[in-house]
Image (tube, grey):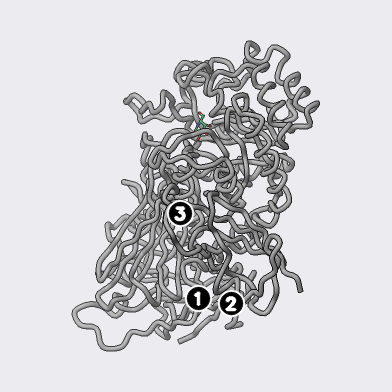
């Protein structure tokens, strides 16, 4: 067998191609080899081997990643290994792409497996080329199959609007577990993320913001394999003669520090694919005013926001003509003069006088049926021929598979960003894509590629604009977006205990710099217990801090607390965005080179504490050097003490933020 070792920072991923050349297989990942012993009966050998990419026609009875048919009606391919396009070096270093090329002589199909290591993450994708004489159809087209050497408890993230990123797990002695989205968008229901627990944890994510599917299969030998890819459509993907189709990336990660360490590997990867802009502390007026936008009132909020240290003021939904509620206006992106009598430029000038940058909300993929855009360009509305388009939240979608629609959205954004001094853009999307349109076209692929093309152009041509991705809360959080926006909005639920739970789930797959979080006045949707303002700040300071409360109702005392917290946050926000995050028994620790920020939170029924004799509560810290000394507030402790005994977390406060500083 020929093997290639992909070297990561602390782990390796070893792939081999047996001499017969019919497949590539996993040899080892992290510390664990993959070994199958014994003889197969009743099935081909390919159905029990740890295949890297399983093609129907090589593998038959076990799950496959690629199914391709031709005009003769058969759906089998038997591509044979031809070359490693990267040449012969058998140790592949980070940053070098490994390409294994297989060719099917009967169909003329070319299957290329691509690998690239970033940190401890293996990026994988495939290209399928049609070098034959007939059109081909791809009926299933995964990005990768990841064989997981150990573990059969699979962790996943599920949710719904206002309740995203809930953690759950399923143990599969044998059999199959599938999640996905049929919404044309990543979706609230599941994140494109599957992971295992255990001393060595493995995880897979898919970088795609359309419809997708991920499955975990434990075969009859007890071996887990995770498949990740774009959803198949009813008529399949057509691949014309001479064309090549390329899948989105699926990434696999491995950590010998368990599930918590796996999150850190993903975070590091997400930092590597992001541009790493330091976030401003923002104020967003959505929760305070919703559609009732009046410049004078917004400025009153802005004055208070500036007073507590906010740096960017964002006007959310409702600033444009025809938008007094959610039934109109989308598509007609003109500033409403009734709401901004001095024009948006006048409003922005007044914000600038307060020392604030300006940010704007937009939902460019959507259109209200009553808008001028809808009447001028009915052909731009996504619909299925002969049927009424499906209305959700009183809005329709533009058909972003069309290049003229892509250009319309781009020119709208470019016009707004060129006309006004906008430093922050919140890009929202408040409905799924349901109308199937013409299934002979790859609607999902075209829409998502056009979306990515606009986001890439936005970044290239307006690099000064910080972009927040949002989709009715957290319905578009995935690695495809993570590499194209600066931060993401995980949920519309900002109530303290609910939010903490959502953020804990978010953290398992997504880094702190991607977690936009606001302090609001919201009471819990699921857990209505109140928490202090400090607690709410600490929850939001664990990511990219924003304020979304009605500041005109805040007391002087609350404003003072806010000022103190925002100042403290500014002192460590770079560390939060660039740290190793550890989960603690009662909170989180963000570990930097010489400093840590620790947030401790009381999530139980606080009113019983202190009413009975009890022992002091201590929370052991993580990620420190046992041999070093650290200052925590006025105290100095050995690292070993902090790691084993921990810091005290008692008294009436429901939350604490501690700075732990290395002394030597
Ligand atoms: C959904 C978003 O998640 C909210 O933050 C807000 O922007 C509304 N849309 C506005 O319609």
Q: Residue at x 45, y 71 (%)?
A: 201
Viewer-proximal residue among 85 and 561? 561
Task: Locate the C terminus by quadrant.
Answer: bottom right
Quick check: 487 left or right of 496?
right
Report which quarter residue 395 is drawn in: top left
The tag earlier along the polypeptide, 2 or 3, is 2
Label 3 environment density (alpha carbons within 10 Å; few <14, some 14–19, many ≥20): many
Q: Which residue is depicted at the point 28% across and 67% down?
A: 172
In contact (CB < 8 Å): disc 2 and disc 1: yes
Total labels: the figure holds 3
Q: Helix, strand, or loop for circle 2?
A: loop
Give the spatial CA distance, label 3 vs label 1: 20 Å
Q: Which residue has dot 1 on it?
A: 256
Who's the residue at 58% across and 77% down the image?
A: 10
Residue 524: percent from left, percent from top:
43, 38
- The residue indicated by pointer 2 is 10
Instruction: Mark 2 or mark 1: name the one nearer the start of the chain.
Output: 2
x then y, percent, for residue 467: 64, 41
Give residue 505's mark. 3
- Label 1 environment density (alpha carbons within 10 Å; few <14, some 14–19, many ≥20): some
Nearer to me, 156 or 334: 156
Q: Is residue 29 left or right of residue 305?
A: left
Callout 3 secondary element:
helix
Tell me which residue sits at (47%, 71%) in the image.
258
Is 417 placed left or right of 603 in the picture? Answer: right
Q: From the viewer's perspective, is residue 607 above or below residue 43?
A: above
């Amino acid at each position: 067998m020929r093997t290639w070792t992909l070297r990561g920072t602390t782990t390796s991923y070893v792939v081999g191609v047996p001499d017969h050349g019919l497949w590539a297989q996993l040899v080892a990942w992290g510390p664990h080899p993959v070994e199958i012993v014994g003889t197969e009966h009743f099935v081909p050998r390919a159905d029990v081997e740890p295949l890297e990419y399983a093609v129907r026609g090589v593998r038959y009875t076990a799950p496959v990643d690629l199914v391709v048919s031709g005009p003769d009606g058969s759906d089998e391919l038997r591509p044979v290994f031809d070359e490693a396009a990267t040449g012969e070096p058998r140790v592949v270093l980070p940053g070098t792409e490994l390409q294994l090329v297989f060719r099917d002589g009967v169909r003329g199909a070319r299957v290329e497996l691509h690998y690239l290591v970033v940190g401890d993450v293996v990026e994988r994708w495939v290209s399928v080329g049609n070098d034959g004489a007939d059109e081909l159809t791809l009926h299933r087209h995964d990005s990768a199959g990841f064989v997981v050497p150990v573990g059969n408890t699979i962790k996943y993230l599920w949710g719904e609007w206002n309740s995203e990123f809930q953690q759950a797990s399923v143990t599969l002695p044998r059999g199959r577990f599938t999640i996905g989205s049929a919404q044309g968008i990543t979706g609230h229901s599941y994140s494109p993320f599957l992971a295992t627990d255990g001393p060595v944890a493995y995880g897979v994510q898919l970088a795609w913001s359309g419809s997708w599917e991920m499955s975990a299969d434990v075969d009859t030998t007890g071996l887990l394999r995770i498949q990740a890819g774009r959803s198949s459509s009813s008529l399949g993907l057509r691949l014309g003669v001479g064309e090549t189709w390329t899948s989105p990336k699926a990434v696999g990660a491995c950590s010998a520090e368990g599930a918590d360490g796996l999150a850190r590997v993903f975070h590091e990867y997400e930092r590597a694919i992001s541009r790493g802009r330091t976030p401003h502390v923002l104020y967003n007026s959505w929760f305070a005013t919703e559609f009732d936008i009046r410049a004078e009132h917004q400025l009153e909020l802005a004055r208070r926001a500036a007073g507590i240290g906010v740096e960017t003021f964002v006007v959310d939904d409702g600033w444009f003509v025809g938008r007094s509620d959610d039934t109109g206006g989308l598509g007609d992106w003109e500033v409403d003069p009734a709401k901004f009598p001095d024009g948006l430029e006048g409003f922005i000038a007044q914000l600038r006088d307060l020392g604030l940058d300006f940010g704007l909300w937009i939902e460019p993929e959507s259109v209200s049926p009553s808008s001028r855009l809808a009447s001028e360009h009915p052909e731009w509305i996504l619909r299925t021929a002969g049927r009424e388009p499906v209305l959700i939240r009183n809005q329709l979608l533009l058909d972003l598979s069309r290049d003229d629609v892509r250009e319309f959205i781009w020119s709208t954004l470019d016009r707004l960003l060129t006309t006004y001094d906008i430093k922050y853009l919140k890009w929202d999307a408040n409905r799924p894509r349901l109308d199937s349109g013409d299934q002979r076209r790859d609607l999902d692929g075209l829409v998502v590629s056009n979306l990515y093309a606009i986001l890439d152009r936005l970044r290239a041509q307006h690099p000064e604009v910080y972009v927040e991705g949002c989709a009715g809360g957290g319905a578009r959080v995935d690695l495809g977006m993570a590499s194209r926006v600066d931060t993401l909005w995980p949920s519309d639920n900002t109530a303290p205990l609910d939010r903490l739970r959502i953020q804990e789930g978010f953290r398992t797959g997504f880094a702190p710099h991607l977690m936009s979080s606001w302090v609001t006045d919201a009471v819990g949707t699921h857990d209505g217990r109140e928490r202090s303002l400090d607690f709410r700040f600490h929850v939001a300071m664990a990511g990219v801090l924003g304020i979304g409360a009605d500041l005109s109702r805040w007391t002087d005392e609350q404003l003072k607390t806010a000022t103190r917290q925002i100042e403290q946050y500014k002192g460590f926000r770079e560390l939060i965005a660039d740290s190793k995050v550890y989960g603690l028994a009662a909170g989180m620790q963000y570990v930097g080179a010489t400093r840590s920020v620790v947030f401790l939170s009381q999530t139980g029924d606080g009113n019983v504490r202190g009413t009975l004799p009890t022992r002091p509560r201590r929370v052991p810290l993580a990620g420190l050097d046992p041999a070093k000394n650290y200052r925590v507030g006025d105290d100095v402790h050995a690292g070993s003490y902090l790691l084993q005994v921990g810091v005290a977390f008692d008294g009436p406060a429901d939350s604490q933020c501690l700075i732990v500083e290395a002394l030597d």
